[in-house]
Amino acid sequence: MHIDANLVVLYVFSVVVMIAMPGPVAVFVAGTGIVGGPKLALRAIAGTNAGSLVLIVLSMLVVQGLLSINETVFTLLKGGGALYIGYLGYQMLHDAGRAAATPVATHGSFTKGFVMSISNPKDIIFFASFFPQFLEITPQPTVSLGLLTGLWIVLDFATLMTVCLLVRRLVKPNVHRGMLRVSGALLMLIALLGVGMAGRDLVSAGLPATMALQEPSTAL
């Protein structure tokens, strides 16, 4: 079976850059690692990875025309997801404010990671537009999709775990609490922007109908 090595390299580079960028998932995993160490971060990464797999499947269904998404429902999901991201940011700020001797809860990190990942449903559109660009990695689209998905899983684990370990190694323990506050604040800012964008989309979607109701009739 022929595999386009150049396209594979481009895909790997693109995925690593996208995952490592300081988005909600990377910030959440880094903050989780600061709170509970690599083991807790690994659980969170497993959760975010599982969420990504769900979004990949949904995006492929959209591409194949087997699934359609109502625009209003989609916007409401984005707003709800943003609120959950804000909740996780608040939890990080709360953890940063606790005394150092207070034990950190280690349960629920997988679930939080999973919900964090799927709480940003616009990633369905991202995967639906990103994956098709690399389906020519092999002559068979189904094989290509399986290869791309497998590479995503490996790169997602490796990149996020590397980010977590680098943060713990490069940032001194006495500033971990400050980093956690920054992570929490970033998540809450991302949530605020997400809620604002969802609200704007809902208002924009309602404008045509409102204008139609207010438009004076020209019928005789």
Image (cartoon, grey):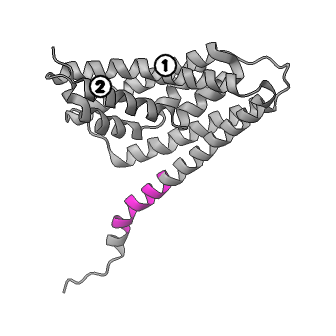
**Image mark for residue 77:** none
**Residue span colored magenta:** 198-210
* Inter-mark Cα distance, 2 to 1: 17 Å
Q: Which residue is mark 1?
A: 158
- Point out the image quarter for the N terminus: top left
Callout 2 crowding tier (Cα within 10 Å): few <14, some 14–19, many ≥20? some
- The residue under the point 69% across, 18% down is 36
Q: Is residue 199 within the magenta segment?
A: yes
In front: mark 2 or mark 1?
A: 2
**Residue 165: quadrant of the picture:** top right
| Residue occupying the far front of the picture | 6
Locate residue 217, reporting x and y percent: 27, 81
Locate residue 41, reporting x and y percent: 60, 19
Amino acid at dot 1? Ala
Residue 76 vs 45, above or below: the answer is: below
> Can see residue 180?
yes
- Disc 1 on helix, strand or loop? helix
The residue closer to the viewer here, 189 or 69, is: 189
**Image mark for residue 8:** 2
- The residue under the point 46% across, 43% down is 78
The residue closer to the viewer here, 173 or 183, is: 173
Q: Is residue 76 within the magenta segment?
A: no
| Residue occupying the far bottom of the picture | 220
Locate residue 14, reporting x and y percent: 38, 33
